[in-house]
Amino acid sequence: MGIKGLTKLLADHAPKAIKEQKFENYFGQKIAIDASMSIYQFLVRFYPLCIKPVYVFDGQPPELKKQGLAKRQVFTDLYSKREDATKDLNTTVETGDLQGIEKYSKRTIKVTKQHNEDCKRLLRLMGVPTIEAPCEAEAQCAALCKSVCGCLEDMDSLTYGAPRFLRQIMDPSSKNPVMEFEVSKVLEELELTMDQFIDLCILSGCDYCDSIKGKLASQILHTQQV
């Protein structure tokens, strides 16, 4: 989904809803993960602490999202015609530009359906549970978070009613603390109902509709509260 400016909005207007946690504090918990966000990331950080990842893969996109996906594809096509990512990657490799290598490497990768199927099979062989969502992975993650899973690594799941979620837990090399957001405190600090919060996220801009041009999430919040 992707909600523009939401992280900054919560940091500025709902700081009490965010806690810094040590990675070790999630020892033994189950964590729902949108697989498309972390298909290339490692599980090695989870297993020493007996954290049980449940990988959720996207199903068919809803009709409302297809317009946003089409726009994203147009941007990808334009980029392919404008610049040759592979050529740029080769140049950065020759010059030893590590940041450039990381940047252009990502642009040369296209995750296919076969990649997803291979990843599911590999995860199952490793004993890692996988789920194919009927629609969007983040909605399924939120449902899991309400029942069998303790938390999840996907901010978009806030709008689907997940009670809490985590940031910065997936990077095995990160030294930053895990950021835990508690949804009930988010609503309390923003002085919004859940329905109003969902409206705020929609107006801020998401995959289902365009944002209001020239309006930041904080400005929309102020307008909504007046």
Image: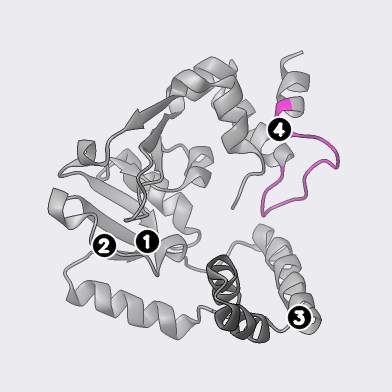
Which residue matches tag 4? 217
Q: What's the residue at 41%, 62% (across, down)?
A: 38
Up the image or down, 124 lies above or below 147; here it is below
Structure colour scheme? one colour
Q: Are the two marked residues, 4 and 3, in contact with CB atoms closer than 8 angstroms?
A: no
Which tag is nearer the camera, tag 4 or tag 1? 4
Point 62% across, 30% down: residue: 9
Q: Secondary structure at mark 3?
A: loop
117 relative to 214 in the view: left or right: left
Q: Amino acid at mark 4?
A: Ala
Residue placed under numbered mark 2 in the picture = 43
Q: In the image, is 70 to the left or to the right of 34?
A: right
Regarding residue 10, the answer to whether it shows in the image is yes
Q: Which residues are magenta?
A: 205-218
Q: CA distance from mark 4 to mark 2?
A: 34 Å
Q: Is residue 129 left or right of residue 20?
A: left
Mark 4 and mark 1: span between their CA atoms?
A: 29 Å
Is residue 50 in sight in this rendering? no
**CA separation in Å, label 4 and label 3:** 32 Å
For residue 47, side relative to residue 141 (left or right):
left
Q: Amino acid at mark 3?
A: Glu
Q: Give x and y (percent) for residue 197.
A: 60, 29
Residue pictured at 53% horizontal, 69% vertical: 98
Q: Residue at x 53, y 46 (%)?
A: 156
Q: Quadrant of residue 148?
A: top left
Name the N-terminal-most of marks 4 and 3.
3
Label drawn at residue 56: 1
Q: CA distance from mark 3 to mark 1?
A: 33 Å
Circle 4/circle 1 CB separation < 8 Å = no
